[in-house]
Image: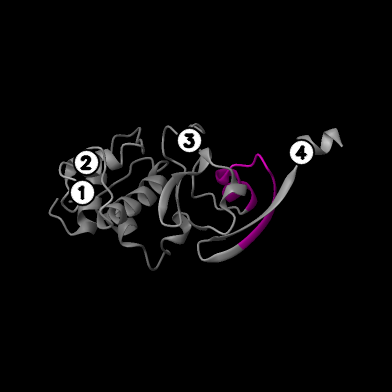
Amino acid sequence: MKDRALHSTTEVSFEVNGKAESLTLDNRTTLLDALREHLHLTGTKKGCDHGQCGACTVMVNGRRINACLTLAVMHEGDEITTIEGLGELDNLHPMQAAFIKHDGFQCGYCTPGQICSAVAVLEEIKANIPSHVTGDLTKPAALSPSEVRERMSGNLCRCGAYSNILEAIEDVAGVSA
């Protein structure tokens, strides 16, 4: 009985990239490990495994999160979108296409997290969710380089493609880069 308490499992069901998934997981399994190791969605990367780099960014119910910092069992019934769920090879998501157009990557390791975060950033601004640099909370949030930089600050790129990433986001938003 004591051993069972140490290795408890739970069945969790959620929707991943539009597909219903049900897994029996150790309660300590992170969402990142459930996606990568159990569902074989390896686009989401394990970078620091401490929530500091953003390589594992996915969207849960439309909000971006670091998948390494949350347990899979906490997402019962949630809708999860990974980089694999944004577009397909012959039909890229506009953000994926903009990253290619503006060379928003170098080594590419952080790119899936950057793209998922960028998609969510535009939705946050559209929904008028303020950031720490939003100047006037009585007016709608506006897309500006400082807003994008602040909102994307949790996604690190060791190669330094930040200016190209900003151009890609502005392109998708319809703002002149």
- Image coordinates of residue 165 in percent, x first then y, are 27, 45
The magenta stretch spans which residues?
A: 21-38
Separation of residues labelled 3 and 1 (CA atoms): 24 Å
- Mark 4–mark 2 Cα distance, whole angstroms, equals 46 Å
Amino acid on which disc 4 is placed: His
User: SS class of the residue under badge 1?
Assistant: helix
Residue 45, percent from left and from top: 49, 43
The amino acid beneath tag 3 is: Gly
**Of label 4 and label 2, which has the lower sequence position?**
4
Residue at left offset 53%, top offset 57%: 78
User: On the rendered structure, is 76 left or right of 92?
Assistant: right
- Residue 28 location, x and y as percent? 65, 39
Q: State the mark number for residue 72.
A: none
- Label of residue 7 in the image: 4
Q: Is residue 153 above or below residue 119?
A: above
Which label's residue is closer to the chain start, 3 or 1?
Answer: 3
Q: What residue is disc 1 on?
A: 167
- Mark closer to the chain start, 1 or 4: 4
Q: What is the secondary structure assignment of the residue under circle 4?
A: loop
Q: Pointer 2: what residue?
A: 163
- In three-dimensional space, the C-alpha distance between marks 2 and 1, rounded to whole angstroms, equals 6 Å
Side of 150 relative to 29 (left or right) = left
